């Protein structure tokens, strides 16, 4: 069964970084308790590479890497918001912050906890199709 998707728009706080992600009305998301997600309030919606489009702000992004250096955390240079990043768990996808979608996008769904503080032990529990509810 094919799930119908449509473009969902979002961006950072100041508007310098804008993106579109093709998603269904119902999404599955993860609330992670790792150090960076807990501090930034990031709620993950995994979006396949082909369904994510950076509309503007490429030159306004700066990256931050830690631990293994695999995940590429991208922040707006102006307002500091991390709207999306390249996760270690899904290197061929983007993790988009559910909180960074525009309010009128009609997204709903469920948010599940993820024990990112114990990442190595927990990563096997993530569904590879996490963005689809």
Image (cartoon, helix red, strand yellow):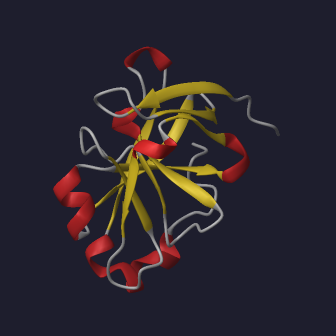
> Relative to residue 129, is residue 56 depicted above or below?
above
Between 3 and 34, the one nearer to me in the picture: 34
* Residue extending furthest toward the top: 104
- Quadrant location, the N terminus: top right
Left or right, 18 with respect to 128, comes to left
Instruction: Give the residue drawn at x 41%, y 49%.
Output: 61
Q: How many marks?
A: 0
* Residue extending furthest toward the left: 39
Instruction: Give the residue drawn at x 40%, y 78%.
Output: 122
Q: Position of residue 13 (x, y in %)?
A: 28, 30
> Relative to residue 81, is residue 35 depicted above or below?
below
Left or right, 32 with respect to 128, comes to left
* Residue extending furthest toward the front: 59
Instruction: Give the residue drawn at x 45%, y 29%.
Output: 10
Quarter residue 31 falls in: bottom left
Left or right, 124 with respect to 16, comes to right
Instruction: Give the residue drawn at x 17%, y 57%.
Output: 39
- Quadrant location, the C terminus: top right
Quarter residue 66 falls in: bottom left
Q: Position of residue 28 (x, y in %)?
A: 50, 45
Quarter residue 81 falls in: top left
Between 130 and 98, the one nearer to me in the picture: 98
> Relative to residue 53, is residue 14 depicted above or below?
above
Q: Position of residue 70 (x, y in %)?
A: 48, 77
Q: Position of residue 25 (x, y in %)?
A: 57, 26
């Amino acid at each position: 069964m094919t799930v119908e998707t449509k473009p969902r728009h979002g961006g950072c706080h100041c508007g310098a970084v804008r993106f579109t992600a093709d998603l269904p009305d119902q999404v599955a998301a993860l609330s992670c308790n790792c150090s960076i997600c807990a501090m930034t309030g990031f709620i993950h919606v995994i979006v396949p590479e082909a369904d994510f489009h950076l509309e503007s702000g490429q030159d306004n992004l700066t990256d931050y890497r830690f631990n293994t250096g695999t995940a590429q955390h991208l922040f707006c240079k102006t307002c500091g918001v991390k709207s999306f990043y390249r996760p270690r768990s899904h290197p061929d996808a983007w993790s988009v912050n559910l909180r960074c979608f525009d309010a009128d996008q009609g997204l709903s769904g469920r948010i599940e906890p993820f024990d990112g503080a114990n990442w190595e032990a927990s990563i096997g529990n993530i569904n590879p199709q996490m963005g689809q509810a």
